[in-house]
Image (tube, helix red, strand yellow):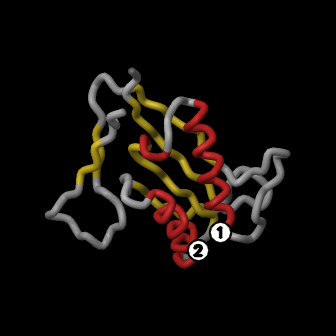
Amino acid sequence: MPRAVTLIRAAALSDVAEYAYAATAPAEARLIFLAGACPLNEDGSTAAVGDYAGQAAKALENMRTALKAAGASQEDVISTRVLVASTRQEDLGTAWAVVRASFGDHDVPSTLLGVTVLGYNDQLVEIEAVAAVLDS
């Protein structure tokens, strides 16, 4: 099935960024706006307390579950915003490495932000995403 998302890499911009600089979807695509994926276990407890990489992995797992429920997959994501509760770039980098590895060649435009606090007890990572699909 053809994908709706087209990633755009701008040759005039630095190639240091590990993501495409823009993405498009055709007018007939159905957009899916996901709530921030949190590192919560099914019972509502926070997974991987104190572990940025572990929380990023759990948030990605939960994001994939939400995408599937909406009739999409991670390859249909058109952009992400990764929120990390820390003032240390090292912690942001730890979470980003997990996200980046998960997306592989589908390196969607992304924003990585350090924030002061997130909504759940012991939460360190949250991942927002938008996806686009072509319904058959």
Disc 1 marks a residue whose amino acid type is Tyr
Q: Quadrant of residue 52?
A: bottom right
* Image quadrant in which the N terminus is located: top left
Name the residue beneath numbered marker 1. 52
- State left or right for residue 77 relative to residue 57: left
Mark 1, Cα crowd under 10 Å, few <14 / some 14-19 / many 20+, is many
Where residue 66 sits: x, y (%)? 61, 38
Disc 2 marks a residue whose amino acid type is Asp
Marks 1 & 2, CB-CB < 8 Å contact:
yes
Q: Looking at the image, which is closer to me, 10 or 4?
A: 4
- State left or right for residue 18 relative to residue 128: left
Q: Looking at the image, which is closer to me, 61 or 118?
A: 61
Name the residue beneath numbered marker 2. 91
- State left or right for residue 49 relative to residue 104: right
Where residue 114 sits: x, y (%)? 55, 64
When the figure is inspected, residue 11 is found, relative to residue 88, above or below; the finding is above
The residue located at (28%, 43%) in the rendering is 6
Q: Quadrant of residue 48?
A: bottom right
Task: Indicate the secondary structure of the residue bearing disc 2.
Answer: helix
The mark total stands at: 2
Q: Looking at the image, which is closer to me, 64 or 32?
A: 64
The residue located at (30%, 73%) in the rendering is 16
When the figure is inspected, residue 77 is found, relative to residue 99, above or below; the finding is above
